[in-house]
């Protein structure tokens, strides 16, 4: 059972639209992450957060933004979607403290036409 | 050069075969090594996690880490059609600087 929930699972949207991908976790984890996954490519980190009001950009240059107002919620927003944003977006979390592997949600498959 | 290189596959084997999946890496700071399994239209799920060099076994799965050679492997014994998925290797340093392989797609044919 997934304790980290992503909505929507699939989204098809036109160029120029603003979209928000939702991610919520019920495990009380402090650290949350957004990854982008394309077929045959490694996962790329686009944003992460180590707690409320803390957000950082990852390795992959991204036109998206994130917010962390509540521990359990880490939404990702694209102000103006483009076809190059077509991808799978994965949210993940881990607790603070000693090292723990990432726990992933089931992803949002985004298609921008 | 990528920090993590994973045998790309795809790999197709008959049911009951032993499967070997492999990754190499270049960053000696990596200390934590993971294998994730990802079914179609799902997120990656943690399969194996190890910290040190050596072998770790869990049922039909064995994870092997050789830090001196910077090489990790996942072995699947008595493979089943339900093992058909994409397998991702992942590794991290102490500061959670995690890197993933590109994944190997495995198909186990009945």
Image: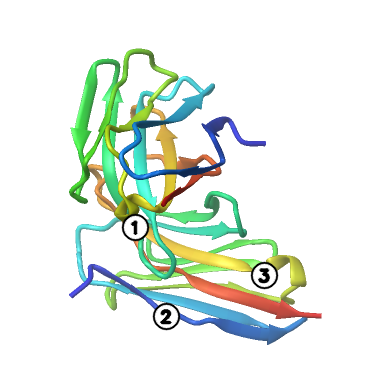
Which residue position is annotated with label 3?
B84
Q: Looking at the rendering, which quadrant does residue B12 occupy?
A: bottom right
Rendered view: B53 above or below A34 = below
Which residue position is annotated with label 2?
B7
Q: CA distance from mark 1 to mark 2?
A: 15 Å
Q: Nearer the viewer, residue A82 or A53?
A: A82
Q: Looking at the rendering, which quadrant does residue B41 occupy?
A: bottom right
Q: Residue B91: which numbered mark, if any? A: 1
Q: Earlier in the sequence, mark 3 or mark 1?
A: 3
Q: Are marks 1 and 2 on the same chain?
A: yes
Q: Nearer the viewer, residue B66 or B80?
A: B80
Q: Position of residue A98 (x, y in %)?
A: 34, 34
Taking the spot 37% from the left edge, 66% from the top edge, the residue there is A41
The answer to whether one can see residue B96 in this image is yes
Which quadrant, please, contains the N terminus of chain A? top right
- Find numbered disc 1 in the image and state the secondary structure of the residue it sits on: strand
Residue depth check, mark 1 versus mark 2: number of the one nearer the observer: 2
Structural crowding at the residue carrying mark 2, measured as other residues with C-alpha within 10 Å and reported as few (<14), some (14–19) or many (≥20): some
């Amino acid at each position: 059972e997934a304790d980290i929930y992503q909505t929507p699972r699939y989204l098809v949207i036109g160029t120029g639209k603003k979209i928000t991908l939702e991610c919520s976790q019920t495990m009380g984890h402090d650290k949350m992450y957004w990854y982008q996954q394309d077929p045959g490519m490694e996962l790329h980190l686009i944003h992460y957060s180590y707690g409320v009001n803390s957000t950082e950009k990852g390795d992959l240059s991204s036109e998206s933004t994130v917010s962390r107002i509540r521990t359990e919620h880490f939404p990702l927003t694209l102000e103006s979607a483009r076809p190059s944003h077509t991808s799978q977006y994965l949210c993940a979390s881990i607790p603070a403290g000693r090292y723990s592997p990432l726990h992933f949600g089931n992803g949002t498959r985004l298609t921008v036409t | 050069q990528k920090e993590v290189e994973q045998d790309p596959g795809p790999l197709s084997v008959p049911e009951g075969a032993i499967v070997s999946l492999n990754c190499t890496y270049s960053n000696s700071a990596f200390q934590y090594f993971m294998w994730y399994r990802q079914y179609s239209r799902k997120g990656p799920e943690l399969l194996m996690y190890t910290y040190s060099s050596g072998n770790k076994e869990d049922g039909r799965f064995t994870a092997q880490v050789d830090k001196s050679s910077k090489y990790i492997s996942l072995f699947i014994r008595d493979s089943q059609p339900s093992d058909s998925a994409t397998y991702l290797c992942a590794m991290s340093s102490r500061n959670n600087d995690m890197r993933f392989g590109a994944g190997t797609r495995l198909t186990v044919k009945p």
